[in-house]
Amino acid sequence: MRNKYLSNVDNRPTIPFSSSEEAWFWYCLCENLKHERSHNNSSKIARPCESSDIAIAVKRLMRNGTLHPEHLKVLAKYGYAQVPPHEHFGDTPRICRLWQEGLKFLGQLLKQKGIVYAS
């Protein structure tokens, strides 16, 4: 899949993320490496977006009321840690639910944009 909006200098075909969780972890990693480009030629996999595209999707979901501040707090905490919440590791069912809901909402939008594979 080629994304005509990306300036992919080496013309590699882009590969969508397999899930919204994978896309979210990638976004958080890119944010942690703020001074690095999120889409560069040294990456083994060319992605169909820039990290800012995921940020824009999150802002859109927040603006329209789909994603709530509680979702974003959980997504940020666990996304930047690069580990999803899990009840077996002491996370509450509510935290796990907010994580799943947030990723579900984000995934629906990212699938529409071709950033995540539509299943």
Image (spheres, helix red, strand yellow):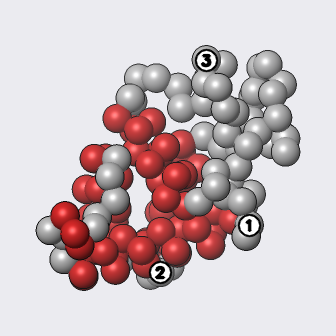
Q: Position of residue 44 (x, y in %)?
A: 64, 26
The amino acid pointed to by label 3 is Ser
- Residue 119 located left or right of residue 28: right
Q: CA distance from mark 2 to mark 3?
A: 35 Å
Mark 2 or 1 closer to N-term? Answer: 2
Residue closer to the observer: 28 or 84: 84
Q: CA distance from mark 1 to mark 3?
A: 27 Å
The single residue placed furthest to the left in the displayed view is 90
Corner quadrant of residue 110: bottom right
Quadrant where the image shows the C terminus: bottom right
Instruction: Give me the disc on residue 78.
Output: none
According to the picture, the residue beneath numbered tag 2 turns out to be: 66
Q: Are marks 2 and 3 in contact (CB under 8 Å)?
A: no
Taking the spot 53% from the left edge, 68% from the top edge, the residue there is: 106
- Give the mark nearest the N terminus, 1 or 3: 3
CA neighbours of label 3 inside 10 A, class few (<14), some (14 to 19), many (20+):
few
Mark nearer the N terminus (2 vs 3): 3
- Mark 2 or 1, closer to the camera: 1
Tell me the residue at 46%/23% (across/down).
Answer: 36
What label does residue 42 carry, if any? 3
Q: Please, what is the three-letter code of the amino acid marked with disc 2?
A: Thr
Residue wearing tag 1: 118
Position of 114 compared to 106: left or right? right
